Image (spheres, rainbow, N blue to C red):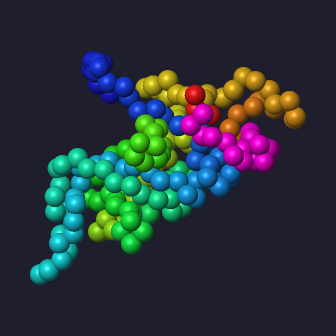
Amino acid sequence: MLDAPILGIIPAALPPLGLLDLMSANGSLRNSLFTIVGYGATDTLFGVGAPDANEGEGTRRYSTEGFLALNPNLIKLNQNAVFGYGGSSHGDAGGPNFLGTGSGGSSLLVAITIGGDPWGIEQNVAYRLDTPPARAFLGQIVILPWEESRSVCRECRETDSPPHLLKKHPSRLRGVDIDRALL
């Protein structure tokens, strides 16, 4: 945390609770792209001795990655150049993973890079920010979006929230425009 507020910037938006689970349930996560940002290495040098994966560290760069896998606290992103993706490498840990790319992308910060494969060519592993543990930590510092709703579901009388929809009414999530849902 900072000693004094930083003025003149707009912080990235955080995801609502369970967003990536909702996207996985309605099938939209499968084709989603992500913009990752970091200051890490740009290349792995091969030659004499062990490969050196620290080439080019220290300059901020960004890249597009595709979805690979979703775990309870992690998201794995495809950074394989064969598919047209770039990716994270040594020195990129702690960097943001935004949902979307280019002019159609968003400032929705859904994960933080924590690791990947040794040479930065296959996958980016990122800690999800839409999970209860992440939100418990972040909630001590910032105001979180889409807190548990106080409304009640008309169909089953339970608290109406993203996890509730995911578990009880997944068909209501098909075709949900995630960007509009965040407004």
- Which quadrant: the C terminus? top right
- Which quadrant: the N terminus? top left
Residue 29: x, y in percent? 58, 54
The residue at 14%/80% (across/down) is 47
**Which quadrant holds residue 177?**
top right
In the rendered image, the vertical position of residue 50 relative to residue 131, given as above or below: below
Q: In the picture provided, is 183 more to the left or to the right than 7?
A: right
Q: Nearer the viewer, residue 4 or 58?
A: 58
Residue 97 in view here = no
Q: Which residues are magenta?
A: 164-180
Q: Nearer the viewer, residue 10 or 150?
A: 10
**Which quadrant holds residue 8?**
top left
In the rendered image, the vertical position of residue 26 relative to residue 7, given as above or below: below
Q: In the picture provided, is 87 more to the left or to the right than 24?
A: left
In the rendered image, the vertical position of residue 108 relative to residue 152, given as above or below: below
Residue 168 lies within the magenta run: yes
The residue at 40%/46% (across/down) is 102
Residue 64: x, y in percent? 39, 55
Report the number of numbered marks. Answer: 0
Q: Nearer the viewer, residue 116 or 64?
A: 64
Residue 68 in view here = yes
Q: In the picture provided, is 69 more to the left or to the right than 155?
A: left
Residue 106: x, y in percent? 45, 39
Residue lying at the far bottom of the rendered structure? 48
The residue at 87%/35% (across/down) is 156
Q: What secondary structure characterizes most of the magenta part?
A: helix
**Which quadrant holds residue 181?**
top right
Q: Nearer the viewer, residue 93 or 31?
A: 31
Residue lying at the far front of the rendered structure? 103
